[in-house]
Amino acid sequence: MADDRSSEKPDKQALLFCLLVAPSREALRSYVCALAMRCLWRLYRSETGQIEMAYYFAKSLNLPFDEAVSKTISALKEHGFGVLTRIDVKNTLKEKIGIEFRSYVILGACNPRMAHQALQAEDKIGTMLPCNVIIQQKDGTSEVAAVDPVASMQAISNTALGEIAAKVREDLKAVVQSL
């Protein structure tokens, strides 16, 4: 069932509350963030009426898989990210359940400065760290995709965290675009 938020109108009572009853900057910022999220939902509406929220950005590379993995790790390092984990999905699925799968690696990428800021802003955010970047063999090419941290953080009402996620998004997009 599609989540049809396009019919929602800005809540006038909530706006009045923010402006009159609770005139703090934080209350107003919270309202503006909620309104912005509603607008984003509208932007991602497809022609069929389904909500399509992009949760990643990707790029196809005309490189052999192993070279794409190496190049991605180097690009992450150049943009301030370390690789904390590396999961070889193909080998893991073969070893654990005997299934053949395409070449597919998940890298757990972390920018220590951004992670520290995020942890200070929201102590449970570690449940959503690190940022995953995948490299997979697909249709004769290697595809690199990175999670969109802003999309990941939608469930959390924390303005400071949203600002940090936006910066990490810029950095991860730069990584993918540099490949």
Image: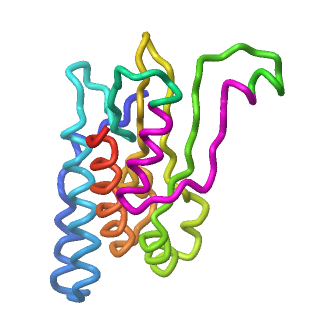
Q: In which quarter of the image is residue 34?
A: bottom left
Q: Residue at x 20, y 88 (%)?
A: 23
Q: Which residue is drawn at 23% across and 47% down?
A: 40
Q: Which residue is drawn at 82% across and 17% down?
A: 98
Numbered label tally: 0
Q: In this view, does 1 lie to the left or right of 59?
A: right
Q: In which quarter of the image is the C terminus?
A: top left
Q: Where is residue 165 in the image (x, y as percent from the top left)?
A: 36, 62
Nearest the viewer among 42 and 128 is 128
Tell me which secondary structure the magenta stretch mostly adopts: helix
Q: In which quarter of the image is residue 153?
A: bottom left
Residue 151, above or below 22: above
The stretch of residues the image draws in magenta is 68-92
Q: Position of residue 121 (x, y in %)?
A: 45, 78
Any magenta on residue 84?
A: yes
Residue 113, above or below 169: below
